[in-house]
């Protein structure tokens, strides 16, 4: 089985960290390839970044010429998943909804611990669209930017402090609210005594399950293939499969 994991930003080091977490979760016989958009924001923090990132991720997948059986979208609360589901003919699993769905199996209410407070609105909207917002007790920011997560000690301290707030607000399960937080689940779970769901790992396991069950996106209604029409993409790059004429170029793999 071949899974493509798309980073939502252009920071290659973060793609590599996400891929390490995805490969650790993947079962025997599953290969994981990471894709980094060739353009877009270096980190996604806010509505503008998110919409720009969505276009870049779609462009990257549109022009990627490798074979794959499923797509994991590794941007927590970011836009684009619905467009990608129209675009590709394999299961598409977003880490936001994957983590929330698994969290709902582990407790009555879950809390999301994320980066900056400004991301709360996007995450809440994403959870609502996925149909799991009613089980979310709270979304708590750590005050750290996405690119600050490389400071391990600072990240751990900030995450534990925010996780305590989430627990005190009624969360029975915690969700890592950024793909760059992959790897924190064991540390925080041990300290707080709560299950902690990593969205990257959750998405990989759900993607494997869908492929093994022979299931993919329904084409009845909402996720029907895009209407045939002229679409103008980035100037000067090659056309890719699936979304009408237009240029583009794949991001580098990992």
Image (spheres, rainbow, N blue to C red):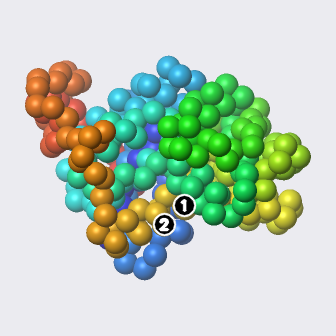
Secondary element type, mark 1: helix
- Relative to 92, does residue 118 appear above or below in the rendering? above
- Relative to 210, does residue 97 appear above or below in the rendering? above
Q: What residue is disc 2 on?
A: 205
Q: What residue is disc 1 on?
A: 202
Query: Number of labelled discs?
Result: 2
Secondary element type, mark 2: helix
Q: CA distance from mark 1 to mark 2?
A: 5 Å
Compare residues 4 and 197 and report the one nearer the observer: 197
Compare residues 92 and 17 and report the one nearer the observer: 92
- Name the spot of residue 231 as percent of width and height, x first: 16, 24
Quick check: marks 1 and 2 in contact, CB under 8 Å? yes
- Name the spot of residue 175 as percent of width and height, x first: 67, 52
The reply to whether residue 31 is in sight is no
The extreme bottom residue here reads 28
User: Residue at left 34%, top 73%?
Assistant: 212
- Relative to 167, does residue 225 appear above or below in the rendering? above
Say few, some or many: other residues with alpha carbon within 10 Å of mark 1 (under 14 / 14 to 19 / 20 or more).
many
On the rendered structure, is 103 left or right of 25?
right
User: Residue at left 80%, top 62%?
Assistant: 194
On the rendered structure, is 64 left or right of 56?
left
On the rendered structure, is 204 left or right of 99?
left
Compare residues 5 and 84 and report the one nearer the observer: 84
- Name the spot of residue 232 as percent of width and height, x first: 17, 22
């Amino acid at each position: 089985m071949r899974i493509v994991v798309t980073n939502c930003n252009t920071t290659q080091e973060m793609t590599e960290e996400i891929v390490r977490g995805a490969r650790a979760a993947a079962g025997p016989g599953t290969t994981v390839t990471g894709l980094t958009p060739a353009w877009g924001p270096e980190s996604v923090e806010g509505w503008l970044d998110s919409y720009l990132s969505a276009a870049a991720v779609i462009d990257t997948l549109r022009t990627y010429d490798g074979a794959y059986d499923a797509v994991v979208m590794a941007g927590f609360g970011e836009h684009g998943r619905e467009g990608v589901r129209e675009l590709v003919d394999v299961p598409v699993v977003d880490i936001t909804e994957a983590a929330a769905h698994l969290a709902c199996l582990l407790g009555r209410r879950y809390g999301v611990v994320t980066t900056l407070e400004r991301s709360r609105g996007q995450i809440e909207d994403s959870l609502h669209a996925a149909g799991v917002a009613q089980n979310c007790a709270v979304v708590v920011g750590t005050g750290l930017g996405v690119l600050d997560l490389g400071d391990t000690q600072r990240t751990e301290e900030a995450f534990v402090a925010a996780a305590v707030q989430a627990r005190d607000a009624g969360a029975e399960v915690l969700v890592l609210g950024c793909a760059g937080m992959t790897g924190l689940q064991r540390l925080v779970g041990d300290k707080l005594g709560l299950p902690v769901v990593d969205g990257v790992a959750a998405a990989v396991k759900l993607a494997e399950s869908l492929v093994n069950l022979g299931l993919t996106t329904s084409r009845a209604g909402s996720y029907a293939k895009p209407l045939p029409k002229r679409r103008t993409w980035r100037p000067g790059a090659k056309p890719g499969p699936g979304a009408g004429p237009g240029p583009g170029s794949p991001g580098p793999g990992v």
